[in-house]
Amino acid sequence: MEPTAGRPPLEVGGPVSTSRPQRVTRAGQRRRPSGEAPPLPRTLNRSGRIWLIAGGAVLLLWAGVVSNQRTAVWVLEADHAVVEWIAGLRSSVLTEVMQTVHALGSRWTIRALFWATVIALVLLRRFRHLFVFLGTTLAVTAFTGFLAYAFAWPRPLGVEIIGDWSGYANPSRPVAALTAILMGMLYSMAPAGRLRRVGKPVIAGLVTALSLSLMYLAVNAPSDVIIAAVVGVTIPLVAFRMITPNEVFPVTYHRGSSAHLDVGGRRGQAIHRALEDQLGLQVAAIQPFGLSGSAGSTPLRVTVKGDPETWLFAKLYAGSHLRSDRWYKLGRTLLYGRLEDEKPFNTVRRLVQQEDYALRLMYGAGVRSPEPFGIVEITPEREYLVVTEFFTDAREIGDLEQVDDGIIDDGLRIIRRLWDAGLAHRDIKPANLLVRDGRVHLIDVFFAEVRPSPWRQAVDLANMMLVLATRSSCEQVYRRARLQFNDDEIAEAFAATSGITMPSQLRKAMRDQGRDLHAEFLRLLPEWAPPVAIQRWSVRRVGLTIGVVLLALLALLTALSSFESAGLL
Amino acid sequence: MRRLLLALAVCLAAGGCVRPASTELAQAREPACRYEGRQGMALIVLMAQAVPTAGQLPCVELLPAGWSVSDVFVRNGRVRFSLDSDRVGTRAVQVVLERYCTFGRVTRVPSDHPGTRRYQEVISIEPGRRYQGAIYYLFPGGCVTYRLDFRSDEQARPLGEVSLALGFVTRDTLRQSLNDFTQGRVPLDPPQEPGR
């Protein structure tokens, strides 16, 4: 194949020029001095710190108390006095009530709550919260089991025990397990705010009720339930606040992509401050924008103060996006073999650097893409914003009724320019093509690749032709394409693209129209090129598949054995 | 900090940290009749609480070489622990303390422990390969069963070792021991109600 033989001049369809961005008013920037906290520091808040310190201190103190004969006897005596007094209140009715309340800490109640939460979190696709919930529940049951073994504390002495029990008494494992599971449910299911605030006293009430019943039945003494409650609260509280902070992983029930972060509250304020300090922008407002077209970041529109006010576009990236990118690439490698650029990023910083670099490359190559304004740090190594020009009054190509020859030529010219610059966009779809004043603008260059394979470049061409054909006809697009690409190049493009290589939004647009545009284009071609297979088999892919299956099995077996030893199965 | 927490969670989940690293700690949690000169360990107190009527509590006097304690389980109404042997197999002896025992076809034999009645039962013998049987000790308020399962051609020697290894602590001794430990401030059992 001759790659560019018979290529028409670039001027076809009008002159190439990048749009002039609006003038954005910028004031002075401010450098964050050493030692000053970043805009959104990642810390436990006050109650989390207090619980962590209190939990550690109580456990250390308790270990000291039980290891010393004198203090241990003192605690035994105090426990005995309290339990004996409570046992003195026993009556047949009260005993029946307490036996019922005791069921709160039964193995079956714990199992029911645990598995109901696991199922709910799976159905809600809240996997990060699920793993923290599993981890903290297992950690609490294992840790209390270890402490009970280490402390070797008897059940209340000198009082008739009238409830069911097993093993050493301190810390009380039913209290710790119930507290941990309820805390896990609260932090993974209840949205922050009123519901969570109401949930805390409810948990306190339930745990207190169980503790009172255990003391009434003389199954546990006060010290047993206090230590258990401290462990049961501290581990989940600290874990959820550290691993799923609400600013980053909010618990919400509105519909939408889990990739979209909440930009209100503390994060909103941090973004304001960071944009002002790092880019010198006077921010008037920050709003989510075009969420439906983005699944890998949180797109935002930033209103900048000035006369008149201007807009900038920003994409917020966080650790969750980095992990999604990793899973996405692993999945693709397992399903199709190593396509191209399937190496995951190591850090969020790397990820935003790639996007900023791609933006600058595209802009420098004369592709009509947004002017980059730079990277803004929100939380070091965790959250960053990529800021670019905002295309005012632009419309998504998919929102247009029809596209004319000028727009078709302009869209195809973008592909030609990418080819000439040795670039591939890799995500040509209606949401990434904006039209303003009859000109096509290419956005979302995150997947862009330098010196891609000819296959990848061919896929870009085919996808551009398919997008344009959704708002015109295949004949019209094909006719215009032949002005910039020869038949071999177009044939190669349609040999390269199929199913998975088309972005899902493009596939959906074609499905909605009930048209098989790929087949229509193939019919127009004078000669078909043999289809390019996307399955790539290699020793690496086979090894990776076996490794992933073995790891998944190992994780499953470990989890099952841990659940069993924790009494959750 | 986050990595530390995750590592801790993984470690705990894998069960690696549940088992104590210290052998001393493990020994202190075995059902030993005597530990550091004192009769009645924490576990024996827990056993006494599990079967509050039991006048005698099973314990390990001295483990012969090759034997170890495993599978200790105490809950209200039942106590169980096992002895593993490197010669006659794991769980070669399972010791169970309950309020009552269910006998099979037993034979009464003279007891080697004062204050108890001893019964024996042979369940099955596979000559040269396996011996299964049971020994029952009856005493006021309780019953202890030794379930024997020797996977070996030897029978007499392990049986002798078991008889030497296992013993009893009386409830009165334990009561006295706890009394000494707490200087009489915390009793083992609730006060006896008149008429009971």
Image (cartoon, coloured by chain):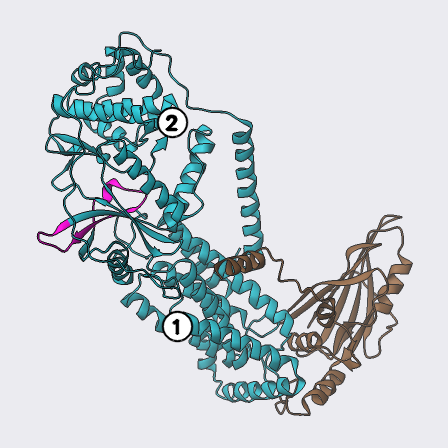
Chain colours: A cyan, B brown
Query: Eyeballing the image, is A446 above or below A439?
Result: below
Q: Where is residue B73 in the image (x, y as percent from the top left)?
A: 66, 66
**Residue B123 shown left or right of residue A513 in the figure:** right
**Mark 2 or 1, closer to the camera:** 2
Q: Which quadrant: the N terminus of chain A?
A: top left
**Residue A500 shown left or right of residue A555 in the figure:** left
Callout 2 amino acid = Pro
Q: Which of A261 and B75 is in front in this view?
A: A261
What residue is disc 2 on?
A452
Going by the picture, which residue comes out furthest to the front?
A: A28
Q: What element carries label 1?
A: helix
Residue displayed at 56% across by 85% down: A79
Callout 1 amino acid = Ser
Label 2: how many residues lie within 10 Å, few (<14), some (14-19) or many (20+)? some
| Magenta-highlighted residues | A288-310
Measure the C-alpha gap from mark 2 to mark 1: 51 Å
Q: Position of residue B25 (x, y in %)?
A: 70, 70
Mark number displayed over residue A47: 1
**Residue A472 shown left or right of residue A366 in the figure:** left
